[in-house]
Amino acid sequence: MSPTRRDVLKWGIGAGGAAALGLALPGTAQAAGSYFYDWMGKLPGSTPLIHLTIPGTHDSWCTDPANGTKWAQTQNWGVPEQLERGIRFLDIRLNGLQGAPNEFGLYHGSAYQGHRFQDVLEACRNHFRNYPGETVIMRVKNENSGGQALSDEEFRRRFNYYLDTMGYRSLVWTAPFWPKLGQVRGKIVIAADFANDWGILTWDSNKAFNIQDDWNTTNFTKSATIVKQFDNAWWHQDSSQMFVNFTSYSGGNWPQQNAHLTLPDVLTYLDARKKEKVHLGIVPMDFPDFYPDIVRLLVQKNFL
């Protein structure tokens, strides 16, 4: 039996979120914020991934302003907490790691973020151990920046080193088509944003993705662009593409400030349409902890 919207509310939202919907959670004392540890596990395995609405993060583990100043910080939640909170798309950008000739480090531009690629993979693996019905879609990007930039060939070599020598191949889905949820439970679906001829999902492919990532802009323009992409997804429910709608941008302010300018508009759009049975694709955000009701509303879309 498929869960109802009321079921989802009981699983995941705190008292503040319930009040916002005019719902009560009698007799409960829940932590602030929203937890959706295993929301995908409640969905049928026959559900196509492209028919989901998926909360995500941009530059997913850039949490410390000491690593490149506040310009480089895009998150307060690290990847393990993001997974606990319902995030199921990760934007992972990699350069070489100094002193480790086979490894990747996480970078924002040329700024190392203090985490290695295996830290992300292990966070996902640990989450799957506890919640085997889940999956994560991961953009893996050759950041190609600074003194640790890697050639296309070297990036591919290190990626395969992780999969084969370090033993992560069984953790990932590498195929050229969008799977159904049941095919990828307990796996990371790789979207390759690096040069390869491997026949896997490719980030910049117009066949696999329809991406809005207008990052060099102003608040007014960005908010309008976000709404337009939501509407594009709404009108193309039968598309074979995964719609992606970045709420982040870098125009003029620190990412923290920009998040406070755009995310209220995202919340307004979603709240006004919270009863519409549509899927909106992937929504990567900076600082989703500022407005956790956005994550809640995105997750709920999958249970209407």
Image: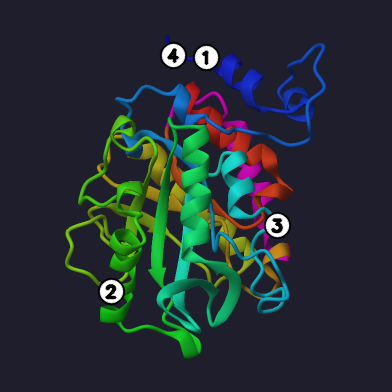
Q: What's the CA distance linking mark 1 and mark 2?
A: 46 Å
Q: Is residue 204 visible?
A: no
Residue that carries the numbered disc 4 in the rendered image: 2
Q: Between disc 1 and disc 2, whose residue precedes? A: 1
Q: Nearer the viewer, mark 2 or mark 4?
A: 2
Secondary structure mainly formed by the magenta segment: helix
Q: What's the CA distance linking mark 4 and mark 3?
A: 33 Å
Residue that carries the numbered disc 2 in the rendered image: 157
Vertical side of 48 occupied by 79: above or below = below
Q: What's the CA distance linking mark 1 and mark 4?
A: 7 Å
Residue 123 pos. (x, y %): 53, 50
Q: What's the CA distance linking mark 2 and mark 3?
A: 32 Å
Residue that carries the numbered disc 3 in the rendered image: 76
Q: Amino acid at mark 4?
A: Ser
Could you tell me which secondary element the residue under label 4 belongs to? Answer: loop
| Residue range (magenta) | 257-278
